[in-house]
Amino acid sequence: MQDDRDWPLYEIFVRARGGLDHKHAGSLHAADARMAIDHARDLYTRREEGVSLWVVRSSDITASDPAEADSLFEPARDKIYRHPTFYAIPDEVKTL
Amino acid sequence: MYTQGLDAAGADARADSADLGGEDALQQRFQRRVDAEQKIEPKDWMPERYRSTLIRQISQHAHSEIVGMLPEGNWITRAPTLQRKVILIAKVQDEGGHGAYLYGAAETLGVGRDQLIDQLLAGKAKYSSIFNYPTPTWADVGAIGWLVDGAAIMNQIPLCRCSYGPYARAMVRVCREESFHQRQGYDIMLRLSQGSSEQRRMAQEALNRWWWPALMMFGPPDGDSTHGTESQRWKIKRFSNDELRQKFVDFTVPQARYLGLAVPDPELRWNDLEGRYHFGAIDWREFEQVLKGNGPCNAERLAARRAAHAQGAWVREAASAYAEKQSVRAANRAA
């Protein structure tokens, strides 16, 4: 019979309050998604830290490569015109 | 602290083979990031010794949480009131949760939880010496919360700023919960110290039993600690063992005084010049013996863990079988 060494890892996301995003809280092992939810409740919401849970198999997550972070994110750095503060608006002009 | 074996284990922590010349640039870049207080994340490049040190430290910490459930779990069925019982259950459950957070953090470094648990059950892994002491009275439960969790907080708060992201984040979660543990312990001591002469005697005896082992939790004195410097350079460790121990004594002695209890150290006195307490010498032979497995409860703790693991096997098997059945059914429905 298989032991828990075959249980996959799940990443747990918790919505702290209605209206907020689900936020990554950590991970845990479970036999299936249903059990991952049950365990996530016990592990991450013992003090009313959440109103909703998402569980995702860790192996189903595709992540960007940290080694490529520069080439991936640097192009945004010199595009300061994308921010409203780039534009000087005369003091006389209101509500803009 | 919960990972004190790290400092004492000079022999089994031999230096890795010298880093290759090609890694020099990576090493320097890594150190610059650490120096700049940037967090290191699981997929980032890291020196092998940084990885192995963290695996050892985090897994020892996780084992300590799990074994730490036993001395207090011993009193769940005998807690003096229903309220004390539910509080104690909640605290012990928290410790299990802390172990789970920490195993999770260790797993991000490429080691399996089962592997780590196997090491614990085989008696090959270290955990904090403190959990090898017995809890003969209810007052010991109070002393553990007050002193052991108090010492743990002292150590864990700086770990919230540790350079390794998953460990730091786990510690933030742990620290949020630990304060309840310390307060509930002090609350037990407070109640006993305001009680009958027998209750006050129980409280005093528990303090006598736990004071020195609590001071040992911070690990060997700085001069003997083999890993302090490297861990500090990597910002895994922020303060030395002796610094944290001193801070603990300075915080705790006034708390004992408020309880009307005497700290079992004839040399203890306030040093006005240094602005801190002077305290007596710690019996490091006792510490070494407990770490080596010869403490009062080492064998009992390990036997309890092994029994719990074996007795839980059918639950794990049943859950696996159920998950398998469900997935087969889902596949058949889809077909």
Image: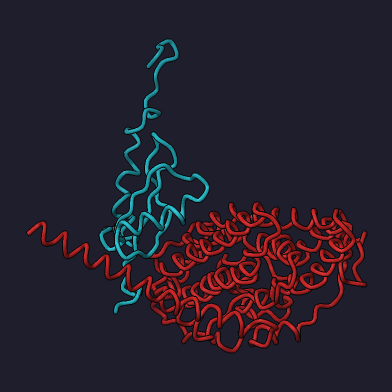
The quarter of the picture where residue B79 lies is bottom right
The quarter of the picture where residue A66 lies is bottom left
Total numbered labels? 0
Give percent across and percent down for residue B302: 56, 82
Which corner quadrant holds the C terminus of chain A? top left
Residue at 48%, 85% in the rendered image: B16
Most foreground residue, B185 or B106 = B185
* In the displayed structure image, the side of residue A41 where residue B12 appears, left or right: right
* In the displayed structure image, the side of residue B187 where residue B313 appears, left or right: left
The quarter of the picture where residue B323 lies is bottom left
Give percent across and percent down for residue B205: 83, 69
Give percent across and percent down for residue A20: 40, 37
Please tell me whether residue B278 is drawn above or below residue B196 in the rendered image.
below
Residue at the limit of the structure toward the top, as seen here: A92
* In the displayed structure image, the side of residue B157 where residue A57 appears, left or right: left
- Residue B170 visible in the displayed image: yes
Please tell me whether residue A2 is drawn above or below residue B199 in the rendered image.
below
Which corner quadrant holds the N terminus of chain A? bottom left
Most foreground residue, B25 or B13 = B13
Most foreground residue, B38 or A55 = A55
- Residue B29 visible in the displayed image: no
Which lettered chain is shown in red?
B
Residue at 59%, 77% in the rendered image: B127
* In the displayed structure image, the side of residue B102 where residue B155 appears, left or right: right
Give percent across and percent down for residue A49: 48, 45
Residue at 74%, 53% in the rendered image: B187
Which lettered chain is shown in cyan?
A
